[in-house]
Image (cartoon, rainbow, N blue to C red):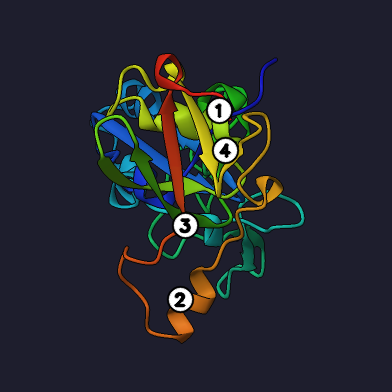
Amino acid sequence: MGRQRYFTPNEVSLHNTVDDLWVSFLGKVYNLTPLCEKYKGDVLLKPIIQSAGKDISHWFNPKTKEIRTHVDPLTGCVIPYCPNGRFIHIPPPYPDADWANDFGRPWWRDESYLVGILSKKTRNIKIINTLTSQEQVIEVCSEEMVSEILSRYVKYNAHAASYTWKYDGNNLDMGKTLEENSIPDEDEEFYKLSMNDDTFLQAIHLYFNDDLTED
């Protein structure tokens, strides 16, 4: 199995309709579109649809990775805690002859919905094409290798792989992260100094391989 892809919260937020529905929880990203198709029209989909594109980690116990529970004040029984309403694969609070539990694994334990990992920290980086002088600021995941950042940049430059990537005059190791390439994340320092525009972002310079000159 290859390395899982990282996603920014902004990327997850774009998938916010019943026909294209992603959520994140406990550090992972899930595509629940097939679940919505399977249970189309079911009222129990409502809490999931309302949470489309959002992080729902608060639904879960971080230790057990199961749905949070509480004691029902009427019965004294421990039941799933669903403040937004009961949802798909959550049993009814009381015995119900219509409840069918033959669905197998509940969706939050079904790895077939897993599409990647939610970034713990994102950052902006400026990429300058020295051949065209084009500048592009993109949001990336701090955990991503430079080769994965290249994949993000391809939509702005289809030939990005034909360039040598450099920072401060040094070739970048495409198999390492920005931090590992000595490009520190200075977001916090920028914020403290109220330097919140893109002017002072660290810049990666791209040199077209056929245009490189030897020192």
Q: Does residue 115 appear in this view?
A: no
Residue 68 in percent (x, y) is at 62, 59
Q: Which residue is pictured at 57% across the width and 62% down the height?
A: 185
Looking at the image, residue 196 sits to the left or right of residue 132; the answer is right
Q: Are marks 2 and 4 in contact (CB under 8 Å)?
A: no
Residue 172 in percent (x, y) is at 61, 36
Residue 187 in percent (x, y) is at 49, 69
Amino acid identity at mark 1 = Ser
Q: Would you call the spot at circle 1 few (<14 residues within 10 Å), some (14-19), or many (20 or more)?
A: some
Q: CA distance from mark 1 to mark 2?
A: 26 Å
Q: Which residue is mark 1?
A: 147
Q: Are marks 4 and 1 in contact (CB under 8 Å)?
A: no
Figure disc tally = 4
Question: Of the residues tagged 3 and 2, which is closer to the observer?
Answer: 3
Q: Would you call the spot at circle 4 few (<14 residues within 10 Å), some (14-19), or many (20 or more)?
A: some
Residue 163 in percent (x, y) is at 45, 23
Q: Which residue is mark 4?
A: 108
Q: Which residue is pictured at 63% across the width and 61% down the height?
A: 69
The first of marks 3 and 4 along the sequence is 4
Q: CA distance from mark 4 to mark 1?
A: 31 Å
The first of marks 4 and 1 along the sequence is 4
The first of marks 3 and 2 along the sequence is 2
Q: Which residue is mark 3?
A: 202
Check the picture and name the quadrant holding the N terminus.
top right
Q: Which residue is mark 2?
A: 190
